[in-house]
Image: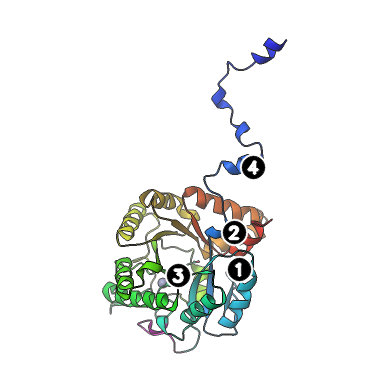
Amino acid sequence: ASTAATSVSISGDISSQLHSGYSHPLARSWQAERQLTKSMLIYPLFISDQDDEEVLVPSLPNQCRRGLNKVIPFLEPLVNKGLRAVMLFGVPLRPGTKDALGTSADDPEGPVIRAIRALRQRFPHLYICADVCLCEYTSHGHCGILRDDGSLNNQLSVDRISDVAIAYARAGAHCVAPSDMNDGRIRAIKLKLIEEGIAHNVTLMSYAAKFSGCLYGPFRDAAGSVPSFGDRRCYQLPPGGRGLARRAIVRDINEGADIIMVKPAGQYLDIISDAKELGKDLPIAAYQVSGEFAMIHAGAKAGVFDLKAMAFESTEGILRAGATIVVSYFAPEFLDWLSD
Ligand code: PBG
Ligand code: ZN
């Protein structure tokens, strides 16, 4: 009887047996190359110049625009739960703050520089990334300085954006992250950081593969950065442009980027995977942008899926594609979910 039992199916194809590797929850987790941890998360924050403001952004579920006096108490419990990093976006609301050159982007009394200083002091272990762009500060809402015909003047824009990056770094940002997409800004920022003698302790994160499209709408509501004319298609990448994205990634690595970012995330998993391959020795960040976040909330609200399950599933896809850093509006929820 025992010989009959052992000879049953070993003549079959042993390699067809897969279930054995993932029957247990722990064994299932071992199937992933990497698991989401709290230290992978960067939480985006909208900081307005109205110190006492705290206003929900209607198109961006549960997210607020906050002044400095509200941001600090808001962050306190999150930092206690293990939040390690934030990305700051300034929102100047005071009338007359915007002009054609985005002059207020590096105002020492502006929201970003004041927030960098205050957060460094209040939360010494929190890693502060500052998004660097002009669109929140220009009267026309574009990500640079314009020529008379409305196109970006690349040289003037790069000069200005690199100055803004230096101002944020000097104020104490651990990381500056230019999101403007002007050609050559990574090199310009790196050279100025070296010239200032601060290149050794400021990380340069490039929004290298940033695609144009309709997923930034809620962000632009929050930041008040909708362009007053035209669109961003001549500087953000065309959605089909995989080769162009690869060139931008290689270029920005060669110009001195420490981290390469891909954005949006969920619609561009192939690009994250390309970034991982091209930048195999760099950390790769993915930004799950405002429209992706709003879409997941809308789907959950419509009963299509459970919010938490979908938040994890979308993030697992991003990690599987190759990201090791995730910029996400779900960060506060993940701090709770990852502690459960
Ligand atoms: C600014 C900037 C944008 C985002 C990050 N930095 C908006 C844009 O380019 O229009 C989008 C982030 C999001 O949608 O969550 N240049
Ligand atoms: Zn911009």
Q: Residue furthest right?
A: 1
**Which percent across, then down, holds residue 88?**
49, 73
**Which percent across, then down, holds residue 55?**
61, 78
Q: Secondary structure at mark 2?
A: helix
- For this view, does 172 lie left or right of residue 186? right
Q: What residue sits right under mark 2 in the picture?
A: 296
Q: Of the residues shown, which amino acid type is indicated by label 1?
A: Val
Mark 3 residue's CB less than 8 Å from ligand 1: no
- Magenta region, mostly helix, strand or loop? loop
Q: What residue sits right under mark 3 in the picture?
A: 174
Indicate which label's residue lies in the foreground, 4 or 3. Answer: 3
Around disc 3, counting alpha carbons within 10 Å, would you say few (fewer than 14), some (14 to 19), or many (20 or more)? many
Q: Of the residues shown, which amino acid type is indicated by label 3?
A: His
Q: Is residue 24 above or below residue 53?
A: above
Residue at horizontal 64%, vertical 65%? 81
Say whether marks 3 and 1 touch (CB < 8 Å): no
Q: Secondary structure at mark 1?
A: helix
- Residue 148 inside the magenta-drawn segment: no
- For this view, does 192 lie left or right of residue 282? left
**Which percent across, then down, holds residue 303?**
68, 56
Q: Is residue 96 above or below residue 290?
A: below
Q: Earlier in the sequence, mark 4 or mark 3?
A: 4
Which colour scheme appears in the figure? rainbow
Give the quarter of the image for residue 169: bottom left
**Which percent across, then down, holds residue 75?**
60, 72
Separation of disc 2 and disc 4 at Cα?
A: 27 Å
Say whether marks 2 and 3 touch (CB < 8 Å): no
Separation of disc 2 and disc 3 at Cα?
A: 31 Å
Residue 14 got which mark?
Answer: none
Separation of disc 1 and disc 2 at Cα?
A: 25 Å
Q: What residue sits right under mark 4 in the picture?
A: 26
Around disc 2, counting alpha carbons within 10 Å, would you say few (fewer than 14), some (14 to 19), or many (20 or more)? many
